[in-house]
Image: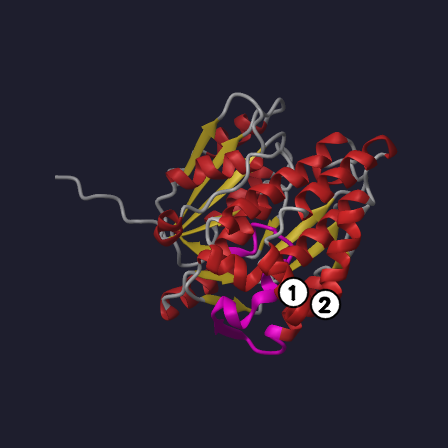
Amino acid sequence: MTSPAPVPDLTAIIPMCNAAATVGKVVDSFLQVPGKRVEVIVVDDGSTDDSVEVVRALAQEDVRLVTLGSNHGAGHARNVGFELARGRYSIFFDADDELDADVVARAIGALDSTDTDVAMMPYIYRRGWTTDYTGMNSFDQIVWERYVGDDARRLVRLSEVPRLLGFSNYPWNKLLRTEHFRRTGLRFSATHVHNDILGHWMTLLGARSILLLNEPVCTHIVGDGGGNLSHRMGRERLALFDALDETYDELQRRPDLRNRYSHHYWDFALRSSAWALDRLAPEVVDDGRQRLQQHLLRINLADFMRIRERRDPSLADRIVRRSLV
């Protein structure tokens, strides 16, 4: 009788759309994680280049290819991949970024030794294929230094580090305990952009404990030409407000958490929408402002009064100003 295959230590879920030049290297980097068995699930999201052929040519037992046939967005692709994950832990990674395989191995070991639900790590930016490396964006850097400083690691609960909720909602700087987050219903939005907002919030809100590991796990490649999806400035950018609505819907279903973290949510919503509005094409700006106003008017009145009276009066003023625009 054939014995069952060992459970992978990690499942890497990689949505892919026209990434033939980079996906092979990303997949190989996961297969090189030292001392760990890694299953890689590549979900092709309607590629029209040679991406599928590149993945098929790898011919590795631990590499699984799922083809969606048409483009649904990275959030949908991540959800499909997560349903199939067999690893004890999961990570959602992009097909055009760079992984530090040694950090991943240490993160798995740290999760095992602490029985933690999620490990969260810093990241690095690199512009194009140059050697122009930079650290995290300014908000993330301030929050990380406040909560971690020079420590190698910290084991915390969200109540101790709530500003992590406002951290850039990248999916690739977290290792998740697969079965735990299956039980919590972790998912990403179906929007083509900003689909990782919901995933970020559901991850941190659903974690019983969080391991902050002070080693960059990912180098995020920022396109020189600004032509990638995250730099588009047209009507599709309004999907941000669909993603915010879906995230707030989740908070509404959990009023205890909405109450506790509402000021962090509304600060994040204002910051992210300001970033988007500054980049919208002129013919879309009025629609963007209206969508923001509609979203802000969803605020729970009791939450607003707590923000106004105790938590952050200046945030309450910003909410009122933007609601009246």
Q: Which residue is mark 2?
A: 313
Q: Of helix, strand and loop, which one carries label 1? A: helix
Please name the residue shown 41% across and 61% down the image.
117
Please name the residue shown 81% across and 38% down the image.
280
Give 304 or 196, whichever is nearer the viewer. 304
| Residue ranking furthest to the bottom | 150
**Are the two marked residues, 1 and 2, in contact with CB atoms closer than 8 angstroms?**
yes
Q: Picture coordinates of residue 233 (x, y %)?
A: 79, 36
Inspect the image, locate mark 1, and give the three-letter code of the amino acid beneath it.
Answer: Ile
Q: Picture coordinates of residue 175 (x, y %)?
A: 47, 56
Q: What's the magenta region?
A: 147-174
Q: Of helix, strand and loop, which one carries label 2? A: helix
Q: Is residue 168 magenta?
A: yes
- Which badge, 1 or 2, comes first in the chain's sequence? 1
Q: Is residue 59 magenta?
A: no
Inspect the image, locate mark 2, and give the three-letter code of the amino acid beneath it.
Answer: Pro
Q: Picture coordinates of residue 192 (x, y %)?
A: 62, 33
Q: Is residue 177 above or below residue 284?
A: below
Give 301 or 207, whichever is nearer the viewer. 301
| Disc 2 residue crowd, few under 14, some 14–19, many 20+, Cα 10 Å | some
Look at the image and tell me in which quarter the N terminus lies. Answer: top left
Answer whether residue 94 is visible to the viewer in this image: no
| Residue ranking furthest to the left | 1
| Residue ranking furthest to the right | 282
Q: Is residue 248 above or below residue 257?
A: above
Q: Which mark is residue 307?
A: 1
Please name the residue shown 75% across and 30% down the image.
235
| Disc 1 residue crowd, few under 14, some 14–19, many 20+, Cα 10 Å | many
**Res 26 → quadrant:** top right
Give 63 or 177, whichever is nearer the viewer. 177
Give 144 or 52, whichever is nearer the viewer. 144
